[in-house]
Image (cartoon, rainbow, N blue to C red):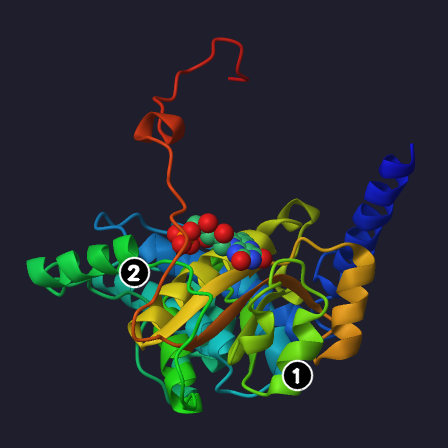
Amino acid sequence: MKKYIVALADYLYDLRRFWRHSAFGKDPARRAKHLQPRLMIAAHGIEKGLSFREFEPRRGVAKLRNALSLIRKHRAMGLPADDPALVMALDAIHHYRQRHAEAGVDIDDLLSDAEHLHRNDVDCVEQSVRLVDPEAFTRAEREIVLAGMRERRSIREFGEGPIDPAVVEAAVTDALSTPSVCNRQGFRAHYSLDRATIDAALRQQNGNSGFGDRVPGLMIVTCSLSIFTASSERNQGFVDGGLFSMSLMLTLHHHGLGNCPLNWSASFRQDQNLRAAVSIPEDEVIIMMIAFGPMPEKPLAAGSRRYDLAHFLTRLERRGTGKQ
Ligand SMILES: Cc1cc2nc3c(=O)[nH]c(=O)nc-3n(C[C@H](O)[C@H](O)[C@H](O)COP(=O)(O)O)c2cc1C
């Protein structure tokens, strides 16, 4: 019974935080951070429809209407004209209009009152559909990417010397290509190279004994809850934040910073303690930490043997009882 209550307290803590900080049930016209993800969702819905070779007139009309209504709210709230969510929506609408004009399909009824929403009043580059270059990835580059994945190992002992913040920035910039739900980009990275700050954070973490006191750099990966608009998205932050973390481990490694993922399997008390110790914005959920530092000359890693392929991969079978 006691364990059940402990679990319940942790779940209630998560529920309260999601309820308070997500965009679920919030009026998008009140706060920019609740409007922006909705605008991103609508814009992405339109641009996705445009990314198919076959043109289908009026595909995604509901998304277009939704985007127009959100853009009006955006304007009414006086939000910046270079807000990426707005630019993305205006780009997508511009392309939507263009594709229909090229196909000779009249959509004036949809856009008649939207002339003032035209993207021309925003100085931006058209980006709503991009051509992917299949040759961009040469064979040699593919091999390097694969080698990077195969060779990555958790590094718990680091080399000497200072860490240049510009290198950390480069690694995070490279990791920004990580996909996210509807391109909402909720993941965030908070880092420190300061001994006292790192110690204060690692004191709350369960898996750094024996090396935490010598970690030269620490990153805390979080995901903003404000980008989630439905209760069904309650776990999405862990997926997006997890993917971002994996990218970061690879890009840090690429930039010469060995690193070790550190779990944030924390009770609500630990979560509160960490927030009291270091500056994590209240509306972000903590995903995990990454300890990093210069690669030592002869890095040694735990063996961490993997199971065979059959342990991970099976053929999916259709069940007869599934809902049709
Ligand atoms: C989400 C996550 C949390 C982890 N937490 C810790 C941790 O707290 N302490 C630690 O020493 N290693 C931690 N690890 C590292 C794992 O032990 C390691 O990834 C695993 O043994 C595989 O080894 P490799 O990373 O060298 O391939 C974590 C890994 C992941 C993915």
Q: Is residue 313 above or below residue 54?
A: above
Percent coordinates x, y for residue 293 in the rendering: 44, 77
Instruction: Give the residue displayed 61% in from the left and 78% down from the top.
Output: 74
Q: Is residue 68 above or below residue 194?
A: above
Pick the front one: 216 or 56: 216
Q: Residue furthest top?
A: 320
Instruction: Give the residue displayed 35% in from the left and 75% down from the top.
Output: 296
| Mark 2, residue position | 100
User: Relative to 70, is 246 on the left or the right?
Assistant: left
Pick the front one: 125 or 65: 125
Q: Is residue 303 above or below residue 34?
A: above
Percent coordinates x, y for residue 284 in the rendering: 67, 68
| Mark 1, residue position | 197
Q: Is residue 62 visible?
A: no
Report the label total. 2
Residue 297 got which mark?
Answer: none
Q: Residues within 10 Å of mark 1 (few under 14, many from 20)?
A: some
Label 1 element class: helix
The disc labelled 1 sits on which kind of residue? Answer: Thr
User: Relative to 151, is 176 on the left or the right?
Assistant: right
> In which quadrant of the rendered view does residue 21 lie?
bottom right
Q: Is residue 2 visible?
A: yes
Instruction: Give the residue displayed 27% in from the left and 53% down from the top.
Output: 150
